[in-house]
Image (cartoon, rainbow, N blue to C red):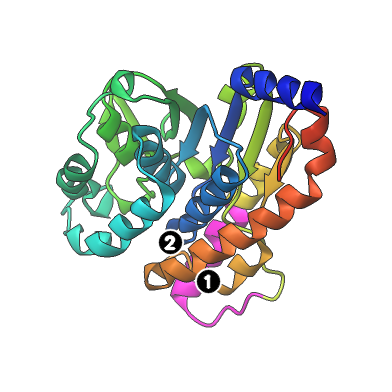
């Protein structure tokens, strides 16, 4: 038993664990509950790859904030009040208005200054491809990654127009493949087959869900563990007021997934209580 425990201690210290965090608007708070559960069970990520709301949470986590601390920050800031009309031909709102608040709560301005490796993805709207950022201006990459087309004016980076990376790739596992020993995917947009379309807003939300859901399925196969709480179907991507409930859903569901994944984790050399 002692030898087995010693072997586990050695393995867990050198094992690289990558976590891919999807977009999902307010539903993205589920990532915080998932991260809290993983930490509680001794499964500490070493690399984060995030898109859209997953990029925001991934950056704060990579900076060193604990999941509960990030939750408190998101609830306190009421992030949507910082949006103002852009008067742009490309979008109704100017996401750059959020730059000040990101800089306030994320003092680190460059990827290179983060204590944890982080990848953030956005979509090049002209070329129609995913672009991964892992160096340079951190806040600008976050803004680009969460810049939903039409709603927000695009972010220009290196002469490219960048928008929400989730429209092309809402589970950015690619940077983790071959770089880590264990890949965990957390997806905040399960498909609700009983979705009620009753307004233009609900039609837009449904269209968004279906579009991004299609690009996730092919990427699940790269995940050793995939976390997608079905209960999220009951929440809108705009319901930031339900952040604490969504956090708890992520926490409890992830604990169940970890329990079910114990045989796989043991094969990887990870023993969880």
* Res 15 → quadrant: top right
The residue wearing badge 1 is: 235
Which of the two residues, 25 or 156, is positioned nearer the viewer here?
A: 25
* Contact (Cβ within 8 Å) of mark 2 with mark 1: yes
Secondary structure beneath label 2: helix
Q: Residue furthest front?
A: 2
Secondary structure beneath label 1: loop
Residue 174: horizontal and vertical position, in percent? 60, 26
Magenta: main secondary structure equals: helix
The residue wearing badge 2 is: 26
Residue 113: horizontal and vertical position, in percent? 29, 21
Residue interval drawn in magenta: 195-211
Which of the two residues, 34 or 40, is positioned nearer the viewer here?
A: 40
236 sits left or right of 272 in the view? left
Image vertical order of residue 77 relative to residue 113, above or below: below
Q: Residue at x 34, y 34 (%)?
A: 63
Q: Is residue 255 magenta?
A: no
Image vertical order of residue 140 relative to residue 57, above or below: above
Image vertical order of residue 28 relative to residue 108, above or below: below
Q: Residue at x 44, y 73 (%)?
A: 201
Q: Residue at x 22, y 28 (%)?
A: 109
Which of the two residues, 207 or 25, is positioned nearer the viewer here?
A: 25
Image vertical order of residue 192 relative to residue 83, above or below: below
Residue 203, labelled with which disc?
Answer: none
First of labels 2, 1 by sequence position:
2
Crowdedness of circle 1 by 10 Å Cα count: few (<14), some, many (20+)?
Answer: some
């Amino acid at each position: 038993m002692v030898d087995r425990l010693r072997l586990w201690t050695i393995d867990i210290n050198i094992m690289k664990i990558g976590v891919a965090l999807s977009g999902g608007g307010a539903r993205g708070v589920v990532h915080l509950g998932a991260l809290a559960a993983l930490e509680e069970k001794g499964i500490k990520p070493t690399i984060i790859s995030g898109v859209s709301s997953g990029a925001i949470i991934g950056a704060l986590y990579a900076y060193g904030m604990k999941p509960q601390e990030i939750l408190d920050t998101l609830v306190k800031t009421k992030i949507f009040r910082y949006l103002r009309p852009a008067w742009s031909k490309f979008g109704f709102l100017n996401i750059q208005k959020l730059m000040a608040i990101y800089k306030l709560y994320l003092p680190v301005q460059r990827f290179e200054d983060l204590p944890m490796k982080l990848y953030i993805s956005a979509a090049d709207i002209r070329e129609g491809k995913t672009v991964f950022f892992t160096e340079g201006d951190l806040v600008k990459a976050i803004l680009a990654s969460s810049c939903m087309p039409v709603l927000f004016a695009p972010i220009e980076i290196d002469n490219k127009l960048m928008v929400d990376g989730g429209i092309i790739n809402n589970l950015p596992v690619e940077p983790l493949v071959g770089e880590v020993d264990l890949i965990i995917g957390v997806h905040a947009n399960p498909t609700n087959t009983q979705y009620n379309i009753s307004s233009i807003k609900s039609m837009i939300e449904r269209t968004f869900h279906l579009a991004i859901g299609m690009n996730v399925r092919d990427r699940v196969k790269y995940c050793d563990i995939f976390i997608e709480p079905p209960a999220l179907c009951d929440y809108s991507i705009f319901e930031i007021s339900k952040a604490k409930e969504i956090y708890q859903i992520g926490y409890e569901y992830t604990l169940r997934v970890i329990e079910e994944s114990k045989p796989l984790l043991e094969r990887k050399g990870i023993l969880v209580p």
